[in-house]
Image (tube, rainbow, N blue to C red):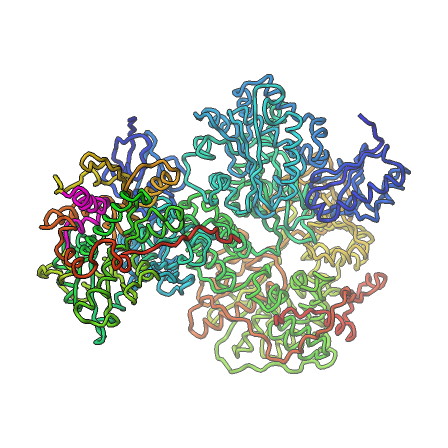
């Protein structure tokens, strides 16, 4: 590749031609701040103007994120003029809305706040954010997401994420000038729009303009209510990310400490969603086998990811028959707790408050779907994200690192490695294959790991040798990738048998409820931890989980039984796109 | 081709259509049919002629007779008289704005004759809906030439030689842009025309599209051939339906004629053109936003590079120019680049279209050679400022541009010169601003526009412009601080540096340029909470009160006069001046030019009503209600000079209880009021009465006491606790021509002083007065009264530029004073006595710093006027002999330098004001100084810091009648009864203006609209 030589802050650097000045500076060891640039999406709109630099011979200051280098370019990134200008931009941003850090969900984890600190902003001549009245307010009508218009800095990262990562396009810029804002693309509120509640926008947001609808206080109220029995389940991907919220290194496995913490927070019973993941595998595996053997709709597509379900209902309602009828592990657990377990331990299910800890914001939406009341009650009452739990543990003054490792409560706490890997892209596929293989062939797997379905690639294909019979499977994570597969199905161009689709990049470990930041490197560390957790477990196949076996013996009788259909399966509703009135 | 006896062109430009040109056309069509003239008279609807304020307009060829402001009922008359009988209808001809003289022919009208039309070559001449008419005027010949004779490189070379630069505002060299687009690698390229003209008041692109759409189609096809594009897009805003209609029609015609589409003119070159209609977002005029909009995306700009020439529409190399740029191309190709480059300046070649708007007589569209001066555009083509108002500045370049003050009228209009002044040529909008424009409010207006039109993408433009608007709003409400002003500049500069696109980078220009040239106006809003233009309405109770240097509560006293409560009216006046009878006679009454009633018929005669109230007291209740000081103060104040400033200060200080002594060098008090203004304007009795009134309050006036001669300045300093120097300006400025020492030469102030003092002054038979101010007119009229047979005023500029009061000039003319304009004396001839004066004729040259054309002598044009008396009345300056040298700061004009807001000289306890500070100024301006001095002298004597302190206006406590809700009937000002000329010229100097009767005064006062009442 052609190289050019440029001078940055007096330092000569050789970089590939066409490199962005921002990246060229990084090569030279100079960090230029940005707020709108989002390298994960190759998004460099040059909008926030924080990354401005001075270039000899060019008028004004240039956005380094958008400017390609030219041979001989002389750049200054820290001249007085540049610093003054950056300060002005930061001051203007701070004065543009309500940036009162104390009451912000992103306090201590905000890119604008960090810049304000870095650039010595002590007084703001353009008006103190604290005295600004709330002009636009919040959009918090939905079940999962809150958009605080007053904190939004219009960087556009959420819009880009929604459009490029998820291809949902639920949000876009609207209006002009100071009235410009991110709108629900023509709808009054995000809840009315095509939003799938995935929360990837939250991860993209540099400030506190986007966050989950918070439920911790509701859960605390329930715990303090002597009439209630509060139980909790924890999703596979929370055990490898919660540590990040509590100052532990990326990829720490904190399963036992999390259980201990939850008990200290007041939960009466702590269950593991991994158990219901195993249950999902049994049901879904048998559904697949059933479809294969009885000419059912193929490829069958996984249904664990509520964002994906909503996406399919909206954009591919014609493909709903491809979806597995299995509920997600969260909802299976919810139904099992209030229907099966309550009876078993003799508790009035109306007194149970069922909480789940999830890496996901769409789960907050999912638990409120009207279909999810097969126990006769709302099966899951509250969903807390990993972030919410982390904050609660800190609030409770629990020294997380000193907690002992505790075990989940039986029987809904016992699980297999197959359940754990649900947290990573390809995990459901692999878990299903471990079971399907052994069920169909009735013989043990030669090798537990299906390396071919693992990896980071957005769309992956694998051919599984079921003792001479080849089964083609595919995996997609991120709905932009999913579209590629779905369009193929629509066009009748695919011969897959089974497809796993996860809403979020990396699978649940990259979910919208996970700690911020979440990026490619961090996702890789979490993935590694997931597989490590799997390896460390004595049981690694769902059908070998003794508690699973027991529940079938005691209650469901067999997979796809009438009881299981009632409690563990569901149906879907087409919600096709209606173009909003654009007047 | 058919031959017609007459060709009748009716303008169908946007402005003429809206004033009814369509119906003129219909009636004309009908009339011609009825009269069987359709074979003789050809009727054509054209695009915009340019003179948009006088539409509908019509031009009749072959002579080019120009009719204006037509109504349908005028048509039969024109057909009968002009078309049949060959006599143009005089009453409908164009009238020169200043003289109201008819001009028959299109080419003789200044507005048109000074223009050079390249872009607008066909506008107003051809029917834009007929391609044949375009072709008949060499249309599509350039395209044929390009396709058959020229290589793309030749086209580029030709444009490069022409020196054409982008007319959309950026001014980038067009030839180089075309070269970039041509050299940019790629199989698919696009040609785009930016017709998203969005500057308020600019409509040149619209006019071309409506008046000559084929010129753009032809140019874009040439561009397609040159850069290697097969597809072009014209991006027009939806607000231009007529342009879209005519353009669509033209594209269709061009296709039918094989001038667009496949194998154009039988060559293997194919090119297609489509229209894209924009929703009218201002930002879509920015090229990257425009391209996004064509692509169907939100119209937001993106950073450049890459430039569109490399990566443009659909990421392909794209050539984008605006309408006006394209319209220049065909004639450049046909006539050669050199032909085009013959107009203009070094770096700005050719012609430029401007849209003239605002306070200018001829509004509309003009095309002029680059390099013409701003002054020529405003005065020679634009016809100057309406209603005798004064030019203040020119706003160039719209919301991205800036204001150029009148000092720079000689600036050549080209990209570089205009930019140097902080404005831009931009797309060519020129808004002329007169004295009634508030520059802060203007900046606020443009900022408001930007705040609405910013796309909201980048922080500085989205947030910064709004903050600037908030600050400007604060200032116009009188709530701003000096820190705000600094912040405004800082923020403006930062936005310019850091914004993403051109819109943001130039957004602060209107603010920065107005601060640059009109900072004092901003400061007045901030410190004094005054908007002198009378625009920022939260700063005053009524425009008249706001315009008054003394801030008299005009609406209240006018209302009281209207009710017959004359004494109360006078009390209201006295709250702000002790000299109402004087003000009511000699004030320059700025209040009246701002009077809202003036917008209906004529302003209320405020000055004369004030005089009426003052006269009423003298006649009916003299020396009553003399105010008593609130308390006794022991401090002594000396005032040097008993003119309007000194007397006002004395009154105010006496009211506070101070011991005031006024030192007057002359035998009688009054200063210029006494010695400068003749009795026929300001009778001595009035002056004496009002001075006596002040004396009755305990003020001691020591006449015949010249400081420096009769009493030492040092002694006053020792004796008094504070001093106010208000010595005025009485030293005449010399002509400095040979013969000035001859007998018979007497300078204006000296002449008036002697006459006013009752001295016998010998005056000859024929008198020449030199000058154009009030002193000159006073001298001339005085000379007549002394018996001069012939009095001639010689003035070096034109009558409308004379600084003297217009009413005084009118009266002088009535009395028989003669005027010679555009002449200046070079020599006074005579042996011992004056025998004649030799003058030279002047012509108006380039514009000077005062915004007027500088008179320059015409060599060899000398002429002699035989006279026996010469009265030079140029100007005066202050006699500074009495003050110790070096003690005071003296300006280069020989005036005291003081703090503008407190009049403090900086020397302990000494203040200065009036003409001694400002140079020869107005009577009321000096009185204002008297108030200021008194206020800060009190502060000084109270031991407080002498620092400006804003004092809110207190409305009078006297109950004021409510406005009546009667309907307003148009009626002019009540005429002021005057002495017949026959009775004026005696030596008794009888007062000319006789004053209103009670009936007249009450009727006149009732004309007030009471705009002080907002509810």
Residue A434 lies in magenta, yes or no? yes
For the C terminus of chain B, the image quarter is bottom right
Asked if residue B375 shows in the view, the reply is yes
Q: Residue furthest right?
A: B85
Q: Image quadrant of residue B150?
A: top right
Q: Residue furthest front?
A: A294
Residue B950 lies in magenta, yes or no? no
Above or below residue B744? Residue A100 is below
Q: Image quadrant of residue B124?
A: top right
- Left or right: residue A207 versus residue B243 is left
Where is residue B431 drawn, in percent x and y? 60, 47
Of residues B681 and B753, the one nearer the viewer is B681
Of residues A93 and B549, the one nearer the viewer is A93
For the N terminus of chain B, the image quarter is top right
Label the magenta part by its dominant secondary structure.
Answer: helix
- Left or right: residue B507 versus residue B795 is left
Magenta residues, start to end:
A415-442
- Left or right: residue B126 versus residue A494 is right
Where is residue B14 drawn, in percent x and y? 68, 44
Q: Residue furthest top?
A: B149
Above or below residue A435? Residue B676 is below
Residue at the spot 22% in from the left edge and 76% down from the top edge = A227
Above or below residue B629? Residue B818 is above
Asked if residue A155 shows in the view, the reply is no
Where is residue B500 drawn, in percent x and y? 42, 44
Where is residue B515 drawn, in percent x and y? 49, 52
């Amino acid at each position: 590749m052609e190289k050019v030589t440029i001078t940055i802050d007096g330092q000569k650097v050789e970089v590939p031609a066409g490199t962005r000045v921002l990246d060229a500076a990084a090569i030279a060891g100079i960090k230029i701040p940005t707020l709108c640039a989002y390298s994960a999406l190759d998004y460099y709109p040059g909008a926030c103007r924080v990354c401005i630099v001075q270039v000899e011979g060019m008028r004004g200051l240039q956005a380094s994120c958008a400017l390609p280098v030219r041979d001989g370019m002389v750049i200054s990134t820290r001249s007085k003029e540049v610093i003054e200008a950056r300060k002005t931009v930061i001051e203007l941003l701070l004065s543009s809305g309500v940036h009162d850090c104390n009451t912000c969900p992103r306090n201590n984890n905000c890119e604008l706040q960090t810049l304000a600190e870095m650039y010595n902003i002590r007084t703001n001549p353009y008006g103190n954010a604290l005295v600004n009245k709330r002009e636009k307010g919040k959009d918090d009508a939905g079940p999962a997401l809150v958009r605080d218009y007053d904190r939004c800095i219009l960087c556009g990262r959420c819009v880009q994420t929604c459009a490029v990562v998820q291809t949902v396009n639920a949000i876009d810029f609207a209006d002009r000038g100071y009235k410009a804002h991110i709108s629900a693309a023509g709808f009054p509120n995000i809840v009315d729009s095509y939003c799938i509640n995935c929360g990837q926008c939250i991860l993209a947001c540099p400030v506190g303009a986007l966050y989950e609808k918070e439920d911790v206080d509701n859960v605390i109220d329930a715990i303090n209510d002597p009439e209630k029995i509060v139980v909790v389940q924890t999703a596979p991907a929370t055990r490898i990310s919660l540590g990040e919220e509590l100052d532990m290194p990326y990829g720490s496995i904190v399963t036992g400490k999390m259980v201990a913490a939850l008990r200290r927070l007041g939960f009466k019973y702590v269950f593991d969603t991994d158990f219901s993941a195993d249950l999902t595998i049994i049901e879904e595996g048998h559904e697949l086998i059933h479809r294969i053997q009885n000419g059912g709709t193929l490829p069958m597509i996984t249904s664990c990811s509520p964002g994906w379900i909503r996406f399919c209902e909206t954009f591919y309602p014609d493909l709903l028959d491809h979806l597995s009828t299995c509920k997600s592990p969260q909802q299976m657990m919810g139904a099992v707790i209030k229907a099966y377990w309550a009876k078993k331990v003799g508790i009035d299910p109306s007194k149970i408050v069922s909480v789940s800890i999830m890496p996901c914001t769409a789960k907050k939406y999912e638990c409120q779907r009207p279909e999810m009341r097969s126990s006769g009650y709302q099966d899951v009452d509250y969903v807390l994200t990993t972030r919410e739990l982390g904050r609660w543990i800190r609030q409770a003054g629990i020294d997380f690192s000193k907690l002992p490792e505790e075990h989940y409560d039986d029987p809904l706490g016992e699980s297999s490695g197959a359940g754990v890997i649900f947290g990573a892209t390809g995990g459901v596929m692999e878990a299903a294959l471990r079971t399907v293989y052994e069920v169909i062939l009735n013989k043990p797997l030669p090798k537990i790991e299906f390396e071919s379905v693992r990896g980071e690639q957005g769309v992956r294909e694998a051919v599984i040798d079921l003792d001479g019979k080849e089964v083609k499977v595919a995996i997609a994570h991120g709905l932009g990738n999913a579209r590629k597969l779905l369009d193929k199905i629509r066009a009748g161009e695919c011969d897959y048998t089974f497809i796993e689709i996860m809403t979020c990049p990396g699978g649940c470990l990259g979910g919208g409820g996970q700690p911020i930041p979440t990026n490619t490197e961090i996702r890789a560390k979490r993935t590694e931890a997931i597989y490590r957790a799997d390896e460390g477990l004595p049981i690694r196949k769902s059908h070998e989980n003794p508690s699973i076996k027991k529940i079938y013996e005691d209650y469901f009788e067999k997979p796809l039984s009438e009881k299981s259909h009632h409690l563990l399966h569901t149906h879907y509703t087409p919600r096709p796109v209606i173009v909003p009135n654009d007047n | 081709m058919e031959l017609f006896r007459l060709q009748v062109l009716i303008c169908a430009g946007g402005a003429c259509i809206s004033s009814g040109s369509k119906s003129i056309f219909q009636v004309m069509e009908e009339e011609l049919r009825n009269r069987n003239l359709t074979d003789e008279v050809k009727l054509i609807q054209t695009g915009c002629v340019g003179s948009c304020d006088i539409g509908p307009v019509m031009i009749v060829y072959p002579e080019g007779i120009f009719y204006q402001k037509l109504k349908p009922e005028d048509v039969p008359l024109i057909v009968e008289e002009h078309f049949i009988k060959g006599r143009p209808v005089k009453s409908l001809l164009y009238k020169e704005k200043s003289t109201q003289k008819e001009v028959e022919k299109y080419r003789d009208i200044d507005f048109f004759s000074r223009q050079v039309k390249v872009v607008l070559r066909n506008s107003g001449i051809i029917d834009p809906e007929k391609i044949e008419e375009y072709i008949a005027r060499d249309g599509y010949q350039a395209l044929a030439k390009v396709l058959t004779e020229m290589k793309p490189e030749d086209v580029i070379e030709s444009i490069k030689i022409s020196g054409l630069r982008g007319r959309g505002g950026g001014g980038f060299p067009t030839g180089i842009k075309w070269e970039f687009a041509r050299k940019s690698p790629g199989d698919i390229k696009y040609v785009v025309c930016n017709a998203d003209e969005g500057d308020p008041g600019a409509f040149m692109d619209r006019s071309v599209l409506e008046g000559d759409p084929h010129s753009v189609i032809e140019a874009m096809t040439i561009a397609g051939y040159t850069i290697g594009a097969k597809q072009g897009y014209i991006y027009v805003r939806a607000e231009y339906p007529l342009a879209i209609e005519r353009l669509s029609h033209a594209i269709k015609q061009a296709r039918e004629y094989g001038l667009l589409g496949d194998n154009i003119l039988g060559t293997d070159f194919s090119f297609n053109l489509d229209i894209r209609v924009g929703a009218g977002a201002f930002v879509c005029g920015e090229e990257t936003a425009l391209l996004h909009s064509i692509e169907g995306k939100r119209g937001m700009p993106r950073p450049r590079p890459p430039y569109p020439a490399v990566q443009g529409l659909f990421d392909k190399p794209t050539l984008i120019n605006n309408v006006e740029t394209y319209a220049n191309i065909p004639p450049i190709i046909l006539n050669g680049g050199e032909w085009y480059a013959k107009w203009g300046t070094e770096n700005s070649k050719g012609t430029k279209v401007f849209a003239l708007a605002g306070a200018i007589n001829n509004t509309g569209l003009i095309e002029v050679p680059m390099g013409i001066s701003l002054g020529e555009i405003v005065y020679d083509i634009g016809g100057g400022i309406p209603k005798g108002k004064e030019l203040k500045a020119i706003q160039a370049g719209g919301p991205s541009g800036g204001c150029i003050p009148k000092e720079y009228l000689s600036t050549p209009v080209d990209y570089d010169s205009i930019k140097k002044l902080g404005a831009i040529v931009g797309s060519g909008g020129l808004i002329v601003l007169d004295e009634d424009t508030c520059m802060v409010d203007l900046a606020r207006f443009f900022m408001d526009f930007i705040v609405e039109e910013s796309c909201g993408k980048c922080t500085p433009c989205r947030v910064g412009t709004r903050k600037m608007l908030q600050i400007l709003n604060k200032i116009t409400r009188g709530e701003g601080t000096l820190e705000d002003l600094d912040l405004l500049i800082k923020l403006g500069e930062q936005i310019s540096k850091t914004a993403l696109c051109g819109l943001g980078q130039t957004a602060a220009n209107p603010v920065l340029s107005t601060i640059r040239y009109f900072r004092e106006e901003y400061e007045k809003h901030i410190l004094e909470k005054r908007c002198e233009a009378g625009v920022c309405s939260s700063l005053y109770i009524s425009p008249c009160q706001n315009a008054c240097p003394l801030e008299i509560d005009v609406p209240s006293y006018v209302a009281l006069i209207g009710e017959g409560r004359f004494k109360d009216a006078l009390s209201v006046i006295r709250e702000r001046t002790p000299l109402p009878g004087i003000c009511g006679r000699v004030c320059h009454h700025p209040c009246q030019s701002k009077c809202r009633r003036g917008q209906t018929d004529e302003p209320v005669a405020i000055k004369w009503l004030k005089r009426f109230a003052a006269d009423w007291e003298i006649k009916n209740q003299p020396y009553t209600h003399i105010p008593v000081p609130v308390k006794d103060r022991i401090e002594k104040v000396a005032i040097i000079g008993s003119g309007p400033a000194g007397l006002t200060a004395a009154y105010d200080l006496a009211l506070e209880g101070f011991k005031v002594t006024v030192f007057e060098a002359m035998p009688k008090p009054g200063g210029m009021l006494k010695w400068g203004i003749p009795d026929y304007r300001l009778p001595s009795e009035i002056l004496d009465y009002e001075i006596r009134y002040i004396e009755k309050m305990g003020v001691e006036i020591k006449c015949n006491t010249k400081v420096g001669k009769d009493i030492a300045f040092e002694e006053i300093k020792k004796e008094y606790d504070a001093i106010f120097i208000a010595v005025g300006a009485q030293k005449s400025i010399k002509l400095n021509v040979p013969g000035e020492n001859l007998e018979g030469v007497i300078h204006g102030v000296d002449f008036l002083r002697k006459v006013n003092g009752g001295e016998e002054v010998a005056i000859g038979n024929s008198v020449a007065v030199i000058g154009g101010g009030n002193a000159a007119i006073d001298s001339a009229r005085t000379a007549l009264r002394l018996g001069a047979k012939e009095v001639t005023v010689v003035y070096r500029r034109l009558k409308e530029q004379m600084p003297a009061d217009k009413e005084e000039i009118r009266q002088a003319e009535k009395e028989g004073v003669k005027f010679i304009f555009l002449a200046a004396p070079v020599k006074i001839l005579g042996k011992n006595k004056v025998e004649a004066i030799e003058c030279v004729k002047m012509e108006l040259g380039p514009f000077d710093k005062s915004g007027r054309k500088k008179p320059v002598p015409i060599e060899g044009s000398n002429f002699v006027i035989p006279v026996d008396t010469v009265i030079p009345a140029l100007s005066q300056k202050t006699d500074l002999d009495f003050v110790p040298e070096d003690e005071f700061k003296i300006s280069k004009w020989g005036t005291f330098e003081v703090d503008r807001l407190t009049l403090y000289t900086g020397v302990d306890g000494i203040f200065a004001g009036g003409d001694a500070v400002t140079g020869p100024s107005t009577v009321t301006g000096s009185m204002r100084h008297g108030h200021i001095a008194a206020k800060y002298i009190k502060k000084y004597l109270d031991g407080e810091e002498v620092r400006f302190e804003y004092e809110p206006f207190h409305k009078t406590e006297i109950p004021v009648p409510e406005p009546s809700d009667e309907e307003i009937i148009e009626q002019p000002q009540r005429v002021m009864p005057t002495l017949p000329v026959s009775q004026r010229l005696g030596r008794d100097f009888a007062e000319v203006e006789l004053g209103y009767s009670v009936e007249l005064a009450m009727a006149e006062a009732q004309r007030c609209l009471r705009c002080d009442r907002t509810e």
